[in-house]
Image (tube, grey):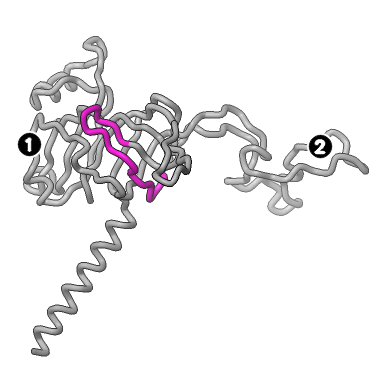
């Protein structure tokens, strides 16, 4: 449970390290994240912060959304996302506040979620990494086909989930443990090491690494238990 940001994938480029090595990076625009709703255990049963990013034309804002944004006194955004947070993080936020890049640090590990690039209809070789059939010696017009997909007389059907040709891409995916290499606070940009899901201009969610946070919480709980045991022995 950690506060994150909603952003837009600007594109990929490269930066050079101090020793001259070229490092591919992804540039993310996370400027002007506005808090549109604060959820508390007393009113909603859990602690969360809802933020909006970007701009939405007035003709695209219906009455419920207009009232929702007006209640928070923020400009209508084109995307709304919610982050589960701790009570400490919740106490430092208020409606209409702007959440910026200060919640992240250089060298921090983050998880980034986006919609992968759609590639249309694809065969089993491209979609599921099948191996093509042999090119000669009895093979006729079945070089790049999946082969047999059925059964014998019993059960005599194709099982659900069979890997076959179909639509490839355009699905929600998360890449974990990506490193923040640089932060441009003035422009609201995050420079992330490597590639992330999605095409240029696509919306992404950036949050602190779940695995790293989980390990840190586990280590803190173990240290606290050890300290309690030492005090008890004393």
- Judged from the image, the secondary structure of the residue bearing numbered disc 2 is loop
Q: Using a 10 Å C-alpha cutoff, classify the residue at mark 2 as few (fewer than 14 neighbours), some (14 to 19) or many (20 or more).
A: few
Q: Quadrant of residue 219?
A: bottom left
Q: Which mark is residue 142?
A: 2
Residue 2 to residue 191: above or below: below
Determine the residue located farthest toward the right in the rendered image.
137
Chain-order first, disc 2 or disc 1: 1
Query: Label 2 vs label 1: CA separation?
Result: 62 Å
Residue 230 to residue 137: above or below: below
**Is residue 99 found left or right of 210 in the rendered image?**
left
Residue name at image x 68 percent, y 46 percent: 157
Residue name at image x 47 percent, y 43 percent: 21
**Is residue 59 found left or right of 74 in the rendered image?**
right
Residue 191 place in picture, x, y as percent? 34, 37
Q: Quadrant of residue 8?
A: top left
Residue 149 place in picture, x, y as percent? 71, 45
Residue 86 to residue 9: above or below: below
Residue name at image x 45 percent, y 28 percent: 199
Q: Which mark is residue 94?
A: 1
Residue name at image x 8 percent, y 23 percent: 73
**Is residue 40 found left or right of 154 in the rendered image?**
left
Residue 82 place in picture, x, y as percent? 23, 38
Residues rendered magenta in the picture: 174-190
Q: Main secondary structure of the magenta part?
A: strand
Camera-nearest residue between 119 and 158: 119
């Amino acid at each position: 449970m950690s506060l994150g940001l909603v952003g837009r994938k600007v594109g990929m480029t490269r930066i050079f390290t101090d020793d001259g090595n070229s490092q591919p990076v992804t540039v993310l625009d996370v400027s002007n994240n506005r808090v549109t709703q604060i959820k508390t255990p007393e009113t909603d049963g859990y602690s969360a912060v809802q933020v909006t990013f970007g701009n939405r034309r007035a003709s695209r804002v219906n009455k419920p959304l207009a009232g929702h944004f007006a209640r928070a006194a923020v400009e209508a955004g084109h995307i709304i996302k919610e982050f589960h947070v701790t009570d400490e993080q919740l106490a430092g936020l208020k409606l209409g506040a702007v959440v910026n890049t200060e919640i992240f640090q250089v060298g921090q590990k983050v998880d980034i979620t986006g919609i992968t690039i759609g590639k249309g209809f694809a065969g089993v070789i491209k979609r599921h990494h099948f191996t093509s059939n042999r090119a000669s010696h009895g093979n006729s017009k079945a070089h790049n086909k999946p082969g047999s997909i059925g059964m014998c007389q019993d059960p005599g059907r194709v099982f659900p989930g069979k890997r076959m040709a179909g639509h490839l891409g355009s699905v929600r995916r998360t890449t974990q443990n990506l490193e923040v290499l640089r932060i441009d606070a003035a422009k609201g940009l995050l420079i992330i090491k490597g590639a992330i899901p999605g095409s240029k201009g696509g919306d992404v969610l950036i949050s602190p690494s779940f695995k790293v946070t989980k390990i840190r919480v586990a280590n803190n709980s173990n240290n606290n238990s050890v300290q309690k045991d030492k005090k008890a022995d004393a």
